């Protein structure tokens, strides 16, 4: 962007937001990254506090022909919040109020910057929670969950974010304010709400969200099962589901993950095991008891070692602490990691896991597996040290090979992290050119000029309006 | 490479072709929702048949013309279901195109949340795939949800992949006279609470000890069947609004906790804001510019 234009844009945003419009080097660097290993650079960072401020920012951006990018907590792992084409960042961190809890309608209206776990903690005494619970739930925002249609361990039984969003207030890419969905059962017309959830900020910016509240289960049991052979563990996963049980969560960790996590949190994970399953059953007491016994008997058929049932809430929290801190624990062996996210049919878990290990070996990387086994959602972590010369190329090549292996096994590109920038150019592995052109027709109905988070989700070439394509910075690794 | 398209879907695409008006007929169980189809228009039916069912994956892929009866028969052999709760002669594609959930939505959610992958035929007669075949997937823009409730105005559903659930061990209906909102507040995830302004019907599902314990919380008697749901009108309210709504004339049955009211009395469609209306019209113009599909039926009234 021309220097004088940039100065005028900043000055207009500053008039609107005061010190909440920023263009210092530190901020621009910070907001150039998200949870992925990709990096770009924004032109300006804005921290609005209201819908009308978001609307004004969008209008100002449009006046200066500058794209914009909504950002929640920036924990996304697919580069969806990495700025490409020097956009203005609209960070929702200061829009963090729970506006209304409406138990009669079993919804809560929240601002997009409310953190996922803060919402569930607030609802706890009322007997309800927000079901999607990504591993990053302590820091990720509800707005980000909407953008990515996020999942989490408990989505096996409760479904992903889309099923838990009743309505959204949205600032459209042309600056108009709309509401998609409402509190009524069916809504009216086409399902714009369903289309918006998971659109990664390319159809507008959500400024108020009506989330559905889920009743807290009267009974919860958490089991840790260890297996001497990872293949038995994976077979037990399929067998548990095939027996007609849908646990609230069904997570798996491989040997390396167990070792790293145990050293980090001391949860008493069996470090001699080849794999562990963390199984959670919830609901009414009879169903939970039935589930525990069924898991026990299925696991026994698949040569389980120990079955540890958490005795109390404290032990349960400890077992989950291991699972939810696995990614952070990786820092004990390497300073950086690249977390993948693909889904394969449950029956192909072992086959694809073995391929993942082989791919990592071939690229001289360490693979660690902690994942949502119940829905076949693999999360291979490639641990590395970014100061090592040429390592990113190896990580990139291994990543592509893992995605290819998953799709060959009948899987998909992403379970819950989204497409963003990371997987944008992989879309052709799953979709024909015509499929993607149709997706773009739909996206364009909301943003014909490509101002909202440009160059994400669909590969360049399948989009009609790649007007900001020339600005892909050298630093962005796609 | 993208998955191969089945010959049945390709044949359906050829049949639809790239020109002329087309009406897609399912089981004609909700045939006039959105208006009666224009007479004299070429009628086509989507292919039927269970094409891939993997009980251990809990997913099923079938032609959109498959009846719910055929689907249920295949799934129940393995103790599974897709809880659509509509007429057995309705088709899977028809049920999704109309987009009205059955009476157990309170527990199982909207039928759109069972859709994993959809293949539809577009106005050019080409196949479009959206979503993915696994129980969980984020695969670009969610055209699957857009298709649910579209009355086939944006494309003709050809093939769908659905998520299945285990059939609960016990399923029990109770009825009597008790405040339905009190019933709703007392229970943990009931499958249905229906209410006609006087009598209440409750569906409880799960293992038998839980079903018994939950029934003990209520002052209701067991009954064999749910009430007949009137189907000439349908109102969609917020759950709370059922407490105070203007009761329609004629018989009606409301889904407590959900907000749907099934009525004898026909009613007008709810209003759509101008901004949403223009976005929706834009989607129609982009996906079916010539207005080929299902003339006479409308998602958006004039």
Image: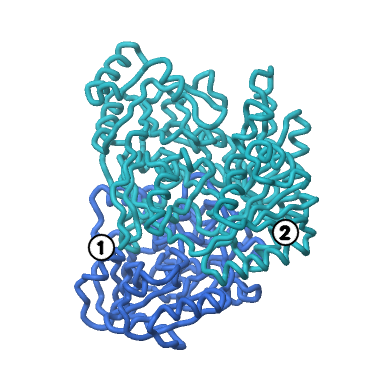
Circle 2 or circle 1, nearest the eye: 2
Kindly identify which chain the residue marked by label 2 belongs to: A
Dot 2 crowding, Cα within 10 Å, few <14, some 14–19, many 20+:
many
Q: Is any atom of residue A22 visible in this view?
A: yes
Q: Residue at x 35, y 13 (%)?
A: A2
Q: Is residue A432 left or right of residue A116?
A: right
Q: Which residue is more in the foreground, B134 or A353?
A: A353
Q: CA distance from mark 2 to mark 1?
A: 49 Å
Determine whether A388 is above or below B6 in the image.
above
Q: Is any atom of residue B159 visible in this view?
A: no
Task: Check chain identity for marks 2 and 1: say if they share one.
Answer: no
Residue B270 circle label:
1
Dot 1 crowding, Cα within 10 Å, few <14, some 14–19, many 20+:
some
Q: Is residue B15 left or right of residue A370?
A: left
Q: Residue at x 30, y 25 (%)?
A: A20
Q: Is residue A154 left or right of residue B181?
A: right
Residue B178 x/y as whole percent: 32, 81
Residue B12 x/y as whole percent: 55, 62
Chain B shown in which color?
blue
Quadrant, the C terminus of chain B: bottom left
Q: Residue furthest top?
A: A3
Q: Residue at x 40, y 61 (%)?
A: B149
Q: Which quadrant would residue A443 be assigned to in this image? A: top left
Chain A shown in which color?
cyan
Residue A179 x/y as whole percent: 29, 49
Determine whether B260 is above or below B250 in the image.
above
Q: Residue furthest left?
A: B246
Quadrant, the N terminus of chain B: top right
According to the image, label 2 marks what residue?
Answer: A236
Q: Which quadrant would residue B168 be assigned to in this image? A: bottom right
């Amino acid at each position: 962007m021309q220097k004088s234009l940039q100065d005028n844009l900043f000055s207009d945003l500053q008039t609107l937001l005061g010190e909440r419009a920023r263009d210092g080097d530190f901020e621009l660097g910070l907001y150039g990254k998200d949870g992925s290993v990709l990096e770009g650079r924004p032109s300006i960072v804005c921290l609005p506090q209201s819908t009308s401020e978001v609307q004004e920012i969008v209008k100002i951006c449009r006046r200066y022909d500058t794209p914009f990018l909504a950002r929640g907590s920036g924990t996304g792992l697919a580069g969806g919040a990495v700025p490409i084409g020097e956009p203005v960042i609209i960070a929702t961190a200061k829009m963090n109020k729970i506006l209304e809890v409406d138990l009669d309608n079993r919804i809560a209206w929240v601002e997009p910057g409310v953190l996922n776990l803060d919402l569930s903690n607030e609802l706890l005494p009322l007997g309800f929670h927000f079901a999607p619970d990504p591993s990053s739930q302590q820091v990720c925002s509800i707005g980000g969950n909407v953008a990515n249609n996020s999942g989490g361990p408990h989505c096996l039984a409760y479904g992903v974010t889309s099923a838990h969003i009743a309505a959204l207030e949205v600032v459209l890419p042309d600056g108009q304010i709309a509401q998609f969905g409402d509190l009524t059962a069916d809504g009216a017309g086409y399902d714009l709400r369903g289309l918006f959830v998971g659109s990664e900020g390319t159809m507008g910016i959500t400024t108020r969200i009506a989330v559905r509240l889920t009743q807290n289960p009267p009974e919860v049991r958490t089991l840790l099962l260890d297996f001497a052979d990872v293949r038995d563990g994976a077979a037990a996963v399929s067998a548990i589901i095939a027996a007609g049980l849908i646990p609230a969560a069904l997570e798996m960790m491989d040997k390396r993950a167990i070792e790293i996590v145990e050293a980090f949190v001391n949860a008493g994970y069996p470090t001699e095991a080849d794999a562990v399953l963390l199984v959670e059953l919830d609901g009414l007491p009879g169903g939970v008891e039935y589930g525990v016994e069924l898991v026990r008997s299925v696991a026994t058929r698949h040569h389980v070692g120990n079955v540890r049932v958490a005795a109390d809430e404290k032990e349960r929290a400890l077992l989950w602490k291991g699972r939810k801190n696995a990614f952070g624990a990786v820092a004990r062996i390497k300073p950086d990691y690249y977390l993948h996210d693909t889904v394969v049919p449950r029956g192909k878990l072992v086959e694809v896991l073995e391929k993942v290990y082989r791919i990592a070996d071939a690229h001289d990387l360490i693979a660690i597996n902690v994942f949502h086994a119940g829905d076949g959602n693999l999360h291979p972590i490639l641990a590395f040290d970014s100061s090592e010369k040429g390592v990113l190329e190896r990580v990139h090549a291994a990543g592509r090979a893992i995605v290819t292996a998953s799709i060959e096994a009948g899987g998909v590109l992403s379970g819950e992290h989204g497409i963003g920038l990371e997987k944008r150019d992989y879309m052709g592995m799953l979709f024909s050119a015509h499929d993607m052109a149709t997706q773009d027709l739909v996206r364009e109905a909301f943003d014909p000029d490509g101002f909202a988070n440009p160059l994400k989700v669909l590969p360049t070439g399948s989009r009609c309006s790649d007007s900001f394509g020339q600005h892909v910075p050298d630093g962005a690794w796609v | 490479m993208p998955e191969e398209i089945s010959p049945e879907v390709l044949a359906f695409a050829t049949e639809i072709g790239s020109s002329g008006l087309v009406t897609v007929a399912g089981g004609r169980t909700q045939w006039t929702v959105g208006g009666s189809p224009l007479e004299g228009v070429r009628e086509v039916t989507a292919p039927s048949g269970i094409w891939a069912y993997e009980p251990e994956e809990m997913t099923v892929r079938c032609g959109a013309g498959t009846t719910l009866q055929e689907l249920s028969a295949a799934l129940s052999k393995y103790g599974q279901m897709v809880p659509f709760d509509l007429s057995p002669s309705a088709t899977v594609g028809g049920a999704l195109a109309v987009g009205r959930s059955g009476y157990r939505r309170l527990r199982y959610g909207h039928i759109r949340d069972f859709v994993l992958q959809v293949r539809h035929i577009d106005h050019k007669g080409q196949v479009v795939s959206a979503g993915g075949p696994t129980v969980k997937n984020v695969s670009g823009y969610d055209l699957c949800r857009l298709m649910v409730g579209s009355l086939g105005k944006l494309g003709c559903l050809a093939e769908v992949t659905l998520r299945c659930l285990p059939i609960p061990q016990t399923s029990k209906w109770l009825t009597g006279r008790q405040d339905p909102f009190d019933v709703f507040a007392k229970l943990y995830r009931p499958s249905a609470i229906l209410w006609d302004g006087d009598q209440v019907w409750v569906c409880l599902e799960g293992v038998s000890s839980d079903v018994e314990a939950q029934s003990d919380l209520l002052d209701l008697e067991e009954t064999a069947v749910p009430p007949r749901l009137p189907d000439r009108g349908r109102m969609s309210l917020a759950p709370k609004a059922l407490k105070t709504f203007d009761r329609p004339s004629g018989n009606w049955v409301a889904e407590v906790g959900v907000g749907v009211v099934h009525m004898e009395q026909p009613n007008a469609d709810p209003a759509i804001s101008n901004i949403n209306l223009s976005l929706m019209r834009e989607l129609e113009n982009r996906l079916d510019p010539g207005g080929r599909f299902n003339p006479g039926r409308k998602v958006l009234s004039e």
